[in-house]
Image (tube, rainbow, N blue to C red):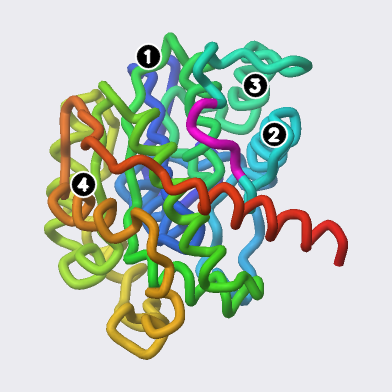
């Protein structure tokens, strides 16, 4: 047991299982990860957890060592978390010069010493092919956190000063990566607004999928009470129906059709089949590169 709020006791006899929470920054990945933890799956070692902050007062529930490794992957690819590479970056496989999947696996095993665990990092949307190679012998379930891109853009603008236009491009790039890498995996599509409005439905969906894959969980009654206490509508500070849409909605690329497709996906999917997305507009890459260059000069 690693000091988290769950009463489950783990030992080596339990079937290994990794739950990866992916989603664009500010999409509720922290909220979802804590909920999976309250179902009974440990996060990383308490000493490795990113501490709570004003932007995530209830905790990030994220491994600092694995986040640093993800940043290292992105740097080796010549990019960053605010300028992720285009989808073709993994066309020749998950190998990266200077980084080995074996070293990544050792780091993850140190951060997550239990046979079953939940790990969240938005960057994993982009680096997932590398981690799938590192974790090739472990059964995995993906939880895909989804939030309206206009709300994400406003949240990033308020927290980090990102222009709405840039944030919309970033949302699109992250989601495209996550869609592609999730192909063939069991996925729980979790919509931020739906989870807040009906946490009991989410608990049922999550429990159904995780039990099928051998998760060792707490009593659902106990877990449901804990998750109800963790979630409340006050967590949601930005709404797509407000005036934030005026500036951000000028972004005219593929976000509308991508989000419409996401709206049709909800709950457990045993074998994820990525929907056919429109081709990414070249201006998305240009916007991300321009912002990245301006940030380096500042």
Q: Name the residue under label 4.
A: 219
Q: What element carries label 2?
A: helix
Instruction: Report the residue at 50% width, 14% height from top.
Output: 133
Q: Is any atom of residue 57 visible in this view?
A: no
Where residue 222 sits: x, y (%)? 24, 56
Which comes sooner in the sequence, label 2 or label 1? 1
Label 2–label 1 contact, CB within 8 A: no
> Which residue is painted at 72% across and 55% down in the image?
292
19 drawn magenta = no
Element under label 1?
loop
Q: What residue is pinned by disc 1? A: 13
Q: Badge 2 is on which residue?
A: 69
Q: Give the range drawn in magenta.
A: 84-88
Q: Does the magenta stretch include residue 86?
A: yes
Q: Disc 4 to disc 2, how far (Cα)?
A: 34 Å
Q: Answer whether residue 257 is visible to the viewer in this image.
A: yes
Q: Quadrant of the C terminus?
A: bottom right
| Pointers 2 and 3 in contact (C-beta within 8 Å) | yes
Q: Which of 51 and 176 lies nearest the eye of the viewer? A: 176
In the picture, measured across the screen, residue 105 lies left or right of residue 185, that is right
Distance of label 2 from label 1 (alpha carbons): 29 Å
Relative height, residue 135 to residue 127 (above, below): above
Q: Mark 3 points at which residue?
A: 104
């Amino acid at each position: 047991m690693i000091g988290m709020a769950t009463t489950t006791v783990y030992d080596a006899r339990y079937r290994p299982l990794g739950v990866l929470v992916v989603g664009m920054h500010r999409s509720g990945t922290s909220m979802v990860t804590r909920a999976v933890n309250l179902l009974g799956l440990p996060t990383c070692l308490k000493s490795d957890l990113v501490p709570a902050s004003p932007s995530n007062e209830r905790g990030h529930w994220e491994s600092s060592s694995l986040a640093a490794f993800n940043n290292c992957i992105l740097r080796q690819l010549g990019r960053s978390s605010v300028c992720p590479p285009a989808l073709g970056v993994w066309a020749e496989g998950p190998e990266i010069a200077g980084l080995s999947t074996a070293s990544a696996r050792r780091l993850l095993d140190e951060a997550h010493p239990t046979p079953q665990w939940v790990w969240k990092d938005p960057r994993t949307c982009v680096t997932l092919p590398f981690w799938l190679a590192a974790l090739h012998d472990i059964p995995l379930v993906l939880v895909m956190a989804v939030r309206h891109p206009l709300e994400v853009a406003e949240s990033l603008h308020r927290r980090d000063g990102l222009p709405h236009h840039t944030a919309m491009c970033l949302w699109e790039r992250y989601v495209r990566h996550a869609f592609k890498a999730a192909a063939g995996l069991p996925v729980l599509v979790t919509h931020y607004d739906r989870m807040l409005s009906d946490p009991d439905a989410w608990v049922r969906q999550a429990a159904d999928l995780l039990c099928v894959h051998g998760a060792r969980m707490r009593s659902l009654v106990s877990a449901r009470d804990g998750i109800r206490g963790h979630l409340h509508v006050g967590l949601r500070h930005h709404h797509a129906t407000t005036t934030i849409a005026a500036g951000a909605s000028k972004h005219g690329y593929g976000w509308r059709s991508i989000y419409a497709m996401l709206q049709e996906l909800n709950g457990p999917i045993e074998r994820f089949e990525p929907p056919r997305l429109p081709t990414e507009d070249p201006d998305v890459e240009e916007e991300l590169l321009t912002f990245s260059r301006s940030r380096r000069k500042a």
